[in-house]
Image (cartoon, helix red, strand yellow):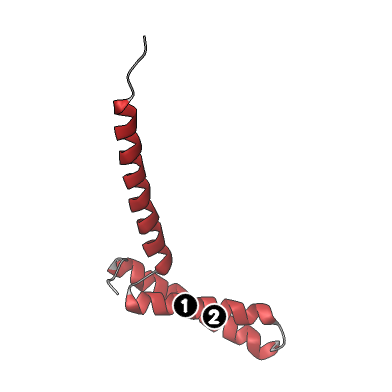
Amino acid sequence: MKPNISLINALMRITCGFTILAWGTSKMVRRPYCASYLWVTMAGAMKVAEGITRYCPMVAMYDQMKHYQCACDEEHKHQEEEIVNPS
């Protein structure tokens, strides 16, 4: 995987991820039967992993869709140029 986020973005993700992870873990200790704290803890762990690997799947998907959109726009522009004005 090629890194697709900057170093500062990665450090922010690690910091926020550890904060969310610590908060979720402390809440799970008091109420282990609440599933929402488990989801929050997993989201925090995911942010830490994204920061360490410097790869975010959502950014990769956005870049891929943006590239696809640009290709479609270019194709559409060429089709409009071929249309002859009837007047």
Residue receiving disc 1 = 46
Left or right: 21 as drawn, with respect to 30: left
Work out which quarter of the rendered image holds the C terminus and state it: top left
Badge 1 amino acid: Met
Picture layout, residue 36 above or below residue 68:
below
Badge 2 amino acid: Met
Residue 52, quarter of the rendered image: bottom left
Picture layout, residue 41 above or below residue 62:
below
Residue 19 in percent (x, y) is at: 49, 77
Left or right: 46 as drawn, with respect to 72: right
Residue 54 in percent (x, y) is at: 33, 73
Identify the disc placed on residue 10: none
Element marked by disc 1:
helix
Front-most of residues 87 and 20: 87
Picture layout, residue 11 above or below residue 67:
below
Work out which quarter of the rendered image holds the N terminus and state it: bottom left
Q: Residues within 10 Å of mark 1 (few under 14, many from 20)?
A: some
Residue receiving disc 2 = 42
Q: Residue at x 54, y 80 (%)?
A: 42
